[in-house]
């Protein structure tokens, strides 16, 4: 049987776990009501008191929290404690337009560290491993979260972050890294670079990889494993729940074990908000159970997955979630950065030369993500627009790079070419294959996609 980082909690019997969840839910609701005016207002509107939570099921009486609520509360409005108690912030990665903030007390950091350590141990990383982390370190929670977790289990960590490929490979070779942690497409790119540098990955001591922060398919997993000669496991998390560490996979691949002693997880029908039966896919909704600085009640993640509470053959008793391949909204993750079409619309709004409609095209031609923004020109432009087009395109590419933190190719289209006839068009075209349901398209949640809606 493989190792478990914290058997007391990870293997707790489910009755005790439910009691623990209830106690922690009551404390969290109380903390939210007493310390966060946003939640006090919400509960008052519903004529609710924290004492109304008498069972875990009573959670459903509480209102949802959305990403917009977090954005409107920027930077401090949801922080439940005086700033002197806060020791760290991370910002939801992506754009400068409407960030969301996550705050941590010293206890929050300790819990987070442990949760990531649990995931790494589930993925069979040990203190004997030399772990190379190529997630970004900074406002994004990935690098720091994995660093803390790997140190917690006593592994030797190389925080290589987003160094250039040849340097990644050189360090891997010199230090004889045995484990890789980062974004899935980067892992593939590393594999390619190893070969380009004339080496055979078989001769390196690499044995395991933990990848996540964005959807990746089983085909991609197989590709990574065969190119790098490693076993690859999935790790899931979201900044709003503190970052990575919410759930992690074992090499046996029976789903990702959720840290249910720290998060209450619901699966709802995103259209009605009602719970779906166990095993059916729906939107994951998280309530924090231990967070001090930024507790959140019923946070709608936008991620679609199912959960399974049946035992899986390891000694962990927590529910397992399926992998996440789809979201309820148009968010796309490019190079690990979460991009919403609205972020792009805001920049385009600065240019009078543009028409109303634009399309986002994401592709991965050479193994790395590329973002193209295709936008209509305004109808009222003079006929000779060549110079104007070139100038506008350059300025837009610069502004988008500033706002999104990545290179963007802009293509300017004839006026009304996207929606000339008034037809609907796809706002996001994602050519990367990420799911079992084929290429990801725009509005990811459609009645078509989930089995319970198949009529
Ligand atoms: O991506 C936290 C993280 C860092 C997770 C490192 C795993 C490893 P955010 O930037 O807030 O936080 O993005 C969260 O990314 O709601 C999902 O849509 C997506 N996501 C994260 N992990 C996975 C995964 C981090 N393993 C958003 N599979 C989430 C599919 C994932 N999607």
Image (cartoon, grey):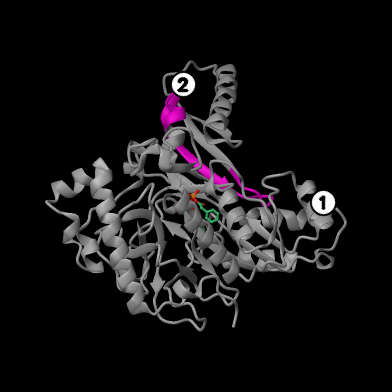
Report which residue position mark 1 lands on: 170
The structure residue drawn at horizontal position 52% and vertical position 37%, both measured from the top left corner, is 373
Q: How packed is label 1: few (under 14 Cα within 10 Å), some, or many (20 or more)?
A: few
Quadrant the N terminus occupies: bottom right
- Residue 79's place in the image compared with 323, above or below, is above
- Residue 325, position as x, y percentages in the image: 48, 61
Q: Would you name the residue on which mark 2 appears?
A: 353
Indicate yes or no whether the magenta region holds residue 233.
Answer: no
Residue sitting at the far right: 198
Element assignment for label 2: loop
Left/right of residue 271 with respect to residue 406 in the rendered view: left
Q: Where, by quadrant of the figure, is residue 447 drawn? A: bottom left
Specify the segment rendered in magenta.
Answer: 346-370
> Residue 330's spot in the image, x, y percent?
42, 48
The front one of 37 and 321 is: 37
The answer to whether any part of residue 391 appears in the image is: yes
Q: How far from the left and from the top, in percent, is residue 303?
A: 41, 57
Q: Residue at x 43, y 20 (%)?
A: 352
Residue 86 location, x and y as percent?
44, 42
Please determine whether, in this image, residue 212 is positioned above or below residue 363.
below
Of callouts 1 and 2, the N-terminal one: 1
Asked if 200 appears above or below 171 in the picture, the reply is: below
**Front-most of residues 453 and 322:** 322
Residue plotted at (49% across, 52% down): 109
Residue at left 49%, top 66%?
A: 323
Q: Secondary structure at mark 1?
A: helix
Image side of residue 172 versus residue 428, left or right: right
């Amino acid at each position: 049987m493989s190792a478990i980082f914290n058997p007391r909690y990870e293997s707790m019997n489910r009755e005790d776990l439910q009691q623990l969840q209830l106690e922690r839910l009551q404390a969290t609701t109380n903390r939210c009501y007493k310390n966060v005016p946003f939640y006090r207002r919400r509960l008052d509107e519903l004529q609710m008191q924290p004492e109304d939570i008498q069972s875990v099921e009573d959670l459903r009486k509480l209102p949802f929290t959305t990403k917009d609520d977090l954005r409107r509360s920027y930077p401090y409005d949801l922080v439940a404690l005086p700033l002197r108690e806060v020791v760290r912030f991370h910002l939801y990665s992506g754009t400068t337009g409407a960030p969301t903030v996550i705050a941590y007390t010293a206890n929050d950091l300790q819990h987070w560290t442990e949760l990531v350590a649990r995931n790494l141990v589930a993925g069979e990383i040990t203190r004997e491993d030399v772990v190379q982390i190529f997630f970004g370190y900074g406002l994004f929670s990935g690098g720091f979260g994995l660093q803390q977790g790997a140190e917690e289990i006593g592994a030797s960590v190389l925080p290589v972050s987003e160094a250039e490929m040849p340097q990644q490979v050189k360090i891997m070779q010199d230090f004889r890294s045995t484990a890789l942690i980062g974004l899935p497409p980067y892992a593939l790119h590393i594999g390619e670079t190893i070969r380009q540098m004339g080496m055979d990955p078989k001769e390196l001591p690499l044995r395991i990889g933990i990848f996540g922060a964005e959807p990746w398919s089983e085909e991609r997993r197989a590709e990574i494993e065969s190119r790098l000669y490693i076993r690859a496991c999935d790790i899931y998390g979201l900044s709003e729940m503190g970052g990575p560490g919410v759930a992690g996979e074992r090499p046996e691949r029976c789903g990702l074990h959720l840290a249910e002693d720290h998060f209450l997880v619901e699966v709802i029908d995103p259209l009605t908000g009602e719970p779906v039966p166990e095993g059916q896919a729906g939107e994951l909704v998280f309530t924090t159970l231990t967070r001090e600085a930024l507790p959140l009640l019923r946070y709608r993640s936008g991620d679609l997955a199912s959960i399974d509470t049946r035992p899986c053959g390891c000694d962990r008793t927590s529910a397992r979630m399926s992998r996440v391949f789809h979201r309820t909204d148009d968010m796309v993750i490019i190079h690990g950065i979460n991009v919403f079409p609205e972020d792009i619309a805001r920049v385009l709004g600065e240019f009078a030369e543009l028409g109303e409609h634009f399309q986002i095209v994401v592709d991965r031609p050479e193994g790395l993500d590329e973002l193209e923004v295709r936008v209509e020109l305004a109808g009222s432009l003079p006929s000779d627009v060549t110079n104007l087009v070139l100038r506008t395109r350059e300025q837009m590419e610069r502004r988008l790079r500033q706002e999104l933190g990545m290179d963007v190719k802009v293509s300017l289209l004839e006026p009304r070419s996207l929606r000339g006839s008034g037809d609907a068009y796809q706002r996001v075209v994602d050519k990367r294959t990420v799911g079992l349901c084929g290429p990801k398209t725009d509005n990811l949640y459609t009645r078509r996609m989930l089995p319970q809606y198949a009529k």
